[in-house]
Amino acid sequence: METNGPRSAEFNPDLKQETTLDESGMDTLDPTDEKRLVRKIDWILMPILITSYALQFLDKTSLAYSAILGLQEDLSLVGQEYSWTSSIFYIGYLVASYPISLGFVRFPLGKYLSILIFLWGVILTLHAVTTNYGSLMALRTLLGIFESAISPGFSLITGMWYTPREHVSRHSIWFAGNAIAGIIGSLIAYGLLKYEGSFPQWKILFLLFGLMTVAWSAVTFFYLPDSPQTAKFLSPTERECAALRPYKYQKTIQTKSWDRQQFIESLTDIKTWWFLLFSFVICVPNGGTTSFSTLIIKGFGYDKFQTILMGLPAPAFQLTTVILSAILSSTFRKSRLINLVLLFLVALAGILMVKLLPQSDKISRLAGFWLVTAVSPAFPLMLSLAASNIAGFTKKATVMAMIFLGYCAGNLAGPQFFIASEAPNYHTAYTTIVICFAITIAMVIGFRFYLSWENARRDKEQGTKIDPEEYRRVEIRTDGDMPQVDQTDKQNKSFRYIL
């Protein structure tokens, strides 16, 4: 099997002259040098990932902004047609999720994602020439197909470059692009409301977001590396050390062939189905509130200018909770699942305020809607749990595909609970969101007990206690000569699960 893992040939001491990592002649990557290497990786990868993710969010939520800029009236959307223009995006996403995941294995990851970013930028730009409901539905489907690679692809990149201890913070950094894009998108939409020319405001929005994405795809094509082993911004020794760091924990390497055994294992692993179901349940609320955010706020009694401005605190609060969640999960051991429960409790309180408070109390209901965005860090936390607790490249790619099947199904279903005849108080939708938040809390608690039990079982069976969050120093000479294997979390007997 062809692999891109740590080298198996003899360590070349001449490489010590090519990097600051081993100028001292040491064979061990000491903490100071490792921090310097991680900072170097961060300064290249994180700006690319966060900008790409921000553009994805702008592109995905452009429909919500266009609703306040005249799209519905110009295209004569009636009844549930607007809901379906949101849902159809996730049908395309759903259909493409598994085929797209095959590309993660067969093609250079950075180039593959860059081409898909270019294609979705072109499709979004074409939204500006749509003339009716049918053409809009077709374009939204294609947009979902091409955007389906970004989140699972970025999660795979994070797993390839970072250790489990670093997964939460790095997933949260690039996911913060959502919140940043929410602020930028609201300001752009507000500015377009001031435009009084003959060209429709919503068409300008699609042209702007689409062309920005097309231009950015060129940046990612040349600067987003395919793997640590091919990163041009690192020296040969730095590439080796960058590949060895996550390999010390998970024994997972990027492969060029699909492993049938790993695929079957992923389908028989209870964790896979937990991630699928959990993703579905948390995305039912997300699908509705993302597409209907402007209509929900407008329904509280604000005009279209106030609606845009009143929506600004929501992404700001989302950004704050993402940062706090990353700090807490990275600082306190065994806290990721506990953190998830706390986030859903805050969001549950928020949706109950929206649902139960009288319509006249629009400030409190608006504050409740802002609190609902506290659930935003749940998605990067879930992705970090998958990246940390699933090993084996084919298995990880499969589980990521399953997560995004749930993501698509949830986001597809979410808008359908916003029934047009119930506007502006979408009682069915708010009740559904309450139920979903309650289910997720129970699922998280049960999953934590399961992972704790599995860790204890492995410790007892092997007669040794292994800490999955311990720091493991890279021994350049000995680790570099380890056999190239791609093991799953079940095959690797020393694997323990992150809580």
Image: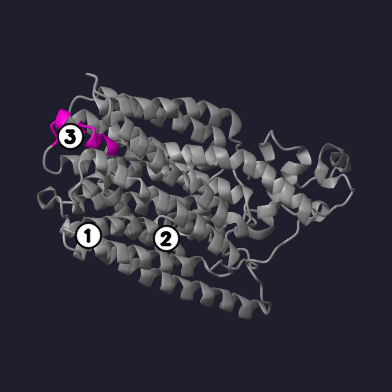
Disc 1 packing (10 Å; few <14; some 14–19; many ≥20):
many
Measured Cα–Cα span from mark 3 to mark 2:
35 Å
Q: Do the residues labelled 2 and 1 touch (CB within 8 Å)?
A: no
Magenta segment: 65-77
Quick one: 429 or 271, which is closer to the camera?
429
Q: Which amino acid does label 1 sit on?
A: Tyr
Residue 496 visible? The answer is: yes
Q: What element carries label 3?
A: helix
Residue 72: which numbered mark, if any? 3
Q: Give the image location of residue 96, x and y in percent.
A: 37, 41
Whichever of labels 3 and 2 marks the residue nearer the N terminus, that label is 3
Whichever of labels 3 and 1 marks the residue nearer the N terminus, that label is 3
The residue under label 2 is 275
Magenta region, mostly helix, strand or loop?
helix
Q: Give the image location of residue 387, x and y in percent.
A: 54, 56
Viewport quadrant of the N terminus: top right
Residue 478: which numbered mark, if any? none
